[in-house]
Amino acid sequence: MSMLRRLALIAAAVVTTPAFAQPPQFGQPIAPADLAPWDISIGPDGVGLPPGRGTAAQGEAVYIVQCHACHGEKGVGRPNDALVGGIGSLAPGSVPVKTVGSYWPYATTLFDYVRRAMPFQESQSLTSDELYAVSAYLLHLNGIIGRDDVLDAQSLPKVRMPNRDGFVLFPRNPK
Amino acid sequence: MAGQKRHAEPAAGNGILSRRLLLEGALVAGVAGIGSGASAEPLKVQSWMKIPGAGFAGYGQPSRYEEKLVRLIPPPPNPATQGVGAARTPLQLLDGIITPSGLHFERSHSGIPDIDPEQHRLLIHGLVKRPLVFTVEALHRYPMQSRIAFIECGGNSQALNAPQALPLNVAAIHGVFSCAEWTGVKLSTLLDEAGVDPSARWVIAEGADSAAMSRSIPLAKALDDALVCLYQNGERVRPSNGYPVRLLLPGFEGNMNVKWLRRLKLAAEPAMTKDETSKYTILLRDEKAWQFVFPMEVKSIITRPSPGLALKGPGFYEISGLAWSGNGSIRQVDVSADGGQSWARAALHAPILPMAPVRFRAPWQWNGGPAVLQSRAIDDTGAVQPARGAFAAERGLRGVYHYNAIASWRIDEKGEASNVYA
């Protein structure tokens, strides 16, 4: 084999090797603005909360129209989950009544869940003002905020839930 | 036949025989009561041998004589919220380890979405160098992997937390557990393509159902063995199990194996979604609750004999069941016919795979008297399935989720089996 041919082969190998080593890349890049309609996550720090505001007084009307049929008068539950009450029922030996008020550690979770999954027959249909208002109503029924306290992107993450410190990490997770 | 005689001798109390009887395929003729003694009816040529059978079907179905082989679907608490709840696998009517796709358990929070795979998208974003969108067609172009894995709902066996044993069968107690061969793309491949930011610790996974069911997954698991599944038992994932794309996190609680996967957001902290705070947390004896309980710990159940499958008189029976661990492979299963006073090792059937169920079998000579059947699994981390008392002593019985204590079937003199605490 001539020196020239040998060099050509080496050069070809150098050129073609990256093509073989390249993992497949079939994802399409997307701009942040274009994915925003899908990004409905809201963390406990409140990042992701939309503009808007509402109070418990305003939220009562939303609740009656959108939630009452499944969650009962003032969130007492039945036929679906109870949303109100049970505070103190986690005590040792008690039968726990786990509701938004007695068990949920973060108020942001309430907003996030109602927005993504409720009302059951028409998810993601409430306006941001309605979401803040109905969240305020449920927190007020649980005695956590006042009837006229305003919930918005700034105040909601600051709401201190009664069971905020009720959770510990499972001790036997894989390392 | 000295060997046979040895095998037919009891290996544990109340008639449990040596597993070697099964392992070595030894004849069991030496075992008393093996046959009924009565002669068979004279044989006749059946009608279906005299006329041609049916033609071909595009998609095959079980025999019409197997109509009772269906999932158990408890009524929803509210008829208006259909699709909330579970369809439970009739494990007592199955054998082997693979669950037929139409019988795989289903737990849904807002029904089964009718997803057009052409329009479905998987988004990876958050703490990544470049957000990416994948079509289902694009996902099919990646190298794939297959593995046999169980999925167990975090709420499986929760009926056994009840103070009194309830008259329920295998499907009603343990039926949100199934196993399939899953095939798809390693999640780490897709995350590498997006470029994970060093500050990311969690992946928030979200489904395309109308509850947008969402869970936070530790990044280490996502980069380890998480699979973005396109196939279930060789065919495309069933709608009830996440068509066209579901996440598989081998060994982790079922709820985290997000179905209809549409979005993965890399984050520094967990999102504290509804299902990882208000649900799937374990309230302990005191006021604290365990959160982020990932692996389904070592467990076994006897599927046969079991409630509804009555024994037909004293004699030889095979005790058969499933054992699994979300932390590894099953090393050993013991069975007892005297409520845990004495134990013998069951035979384990290959394959024995990590995060997959193992079929175990033990020969049993039922003497017609009362018996309490139990099984106890040990995994390859050395973890032993706890007795109900030890389980309750650690965490109480208010936890609802991740119940993995030893379960008991009482056999009465009629051969009927029932759920008991023993």
Image: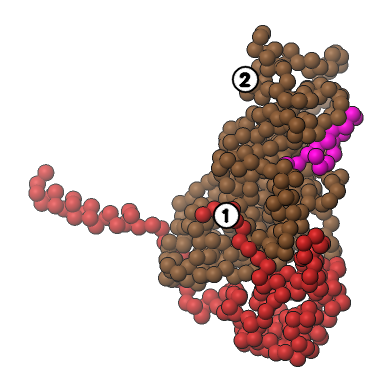
Amino acid type, residue under disc 2 in the picture: Glu
- Identify the disc placed on residue A81: none
In the image, the chain rendered in red is A
- Where does residue B327 sit, x and y in percent of width and height? 57, 47
Give the side of residue B297 with respect to residue A56, left or right.
Answer: left
Amino acid type, residue under disc 1 in the picture: Asn
Residue at image location 67% in from the left, 50% down from the top: B152
Count of picture labels: 2
Hey, which quadrant is residue A136 in on the image? bottom right
Instruction: Say if B8 sits above or below B247 in the image.
Output: above
What residue does disc 2 label? B24
Q: Are marks 1 and 2 in contact (CB under 8 Å)?
A: no
Residue at image location 62% in from the left, 58% down from the top: A170
- Where does residue B189 sit, x and y in percent of width and height? 45, 57
Instruction: Say if B307 sits above or below A62 in the image.
Output: above
Hey, which quadrant is residue B239 in on the image? bottom right
The verdict on residue A114 being magenta is no
In the image, the chain rendered in brown is B
Range covered by the magenta-colored residues: B406-422
Decide: few, some or many residues near mark 2? Use Cα within 10 Å; few <14, some 14-19, many ≥20.
few
